[in-house]
Amino acid sequence: KDIAFDCDGDTLLIQVEQHGAACHEGYKSCFFRSISEDGEYNVTEERLVNPEEVYKK
């Protein structure tokens, strides 16, 4: 959809229309966890694919 770069030209921001999982753990994004006020980790997204089935050895 769009490509932009930062002020010193060492980083690209690529915006896409995503289909499916992008994270190697099977989630849409690698940012699928949050931290609550008491320090607990919470999974905030549903796993889209089983990584063991996708990344067979």
Image (cartoon, rainbow, N blue to C red):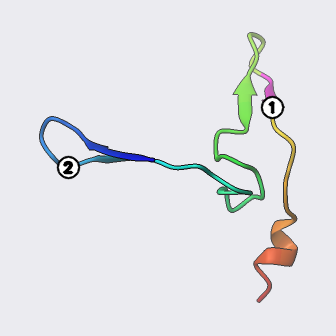
Q: Is residue 8 left or right of residue 3?
A: left
Location of residue 19 in the rendering, given as x and y in whole percent from the top left corner: 69, 56
**Residue at left 78%, top 58%?**
26
Location of residue 23 in the rendering, given as x and y in whole percent from the top left corner: 67, 56
Q: Residues within 10 Å of mark 2 (few under 14, many from 20)?
A: few
Secondary element under disc 1, as helix, strand or loop, is loop
Q: Where are the magenta residues, as a range?
A: 40-44
Q: In the picture, residue 49 is in which quadrant?
A: bottom right
Location of residue 36 in the rendering, given as x and y in whole percent from the top left corner: 76, 16
Q: Is residue 14 in view?
A: no
Q: Number of labelled discs? A: 2
In this view of the protein, which residue sits in the foreground, 57 or 21?
Answer: 21
Q: Report the residue that reaches farthest toward the front.
A: 1
Q: For the residue marked with disc 2, what is the amino acid?
A: Asp
Q: Is residue 22 left or right of residue 37?
A: left
In this view of the protein, which residue sits in the foreground, 41 or 54?
Answer: 54
**For the C terminus, which image quadrant?**
bottom right
Q: In the picture, residue 38 is in which quadrant?
A: top right
Q: In the picture, residue 24 is in which quadrant?
A: bottom right
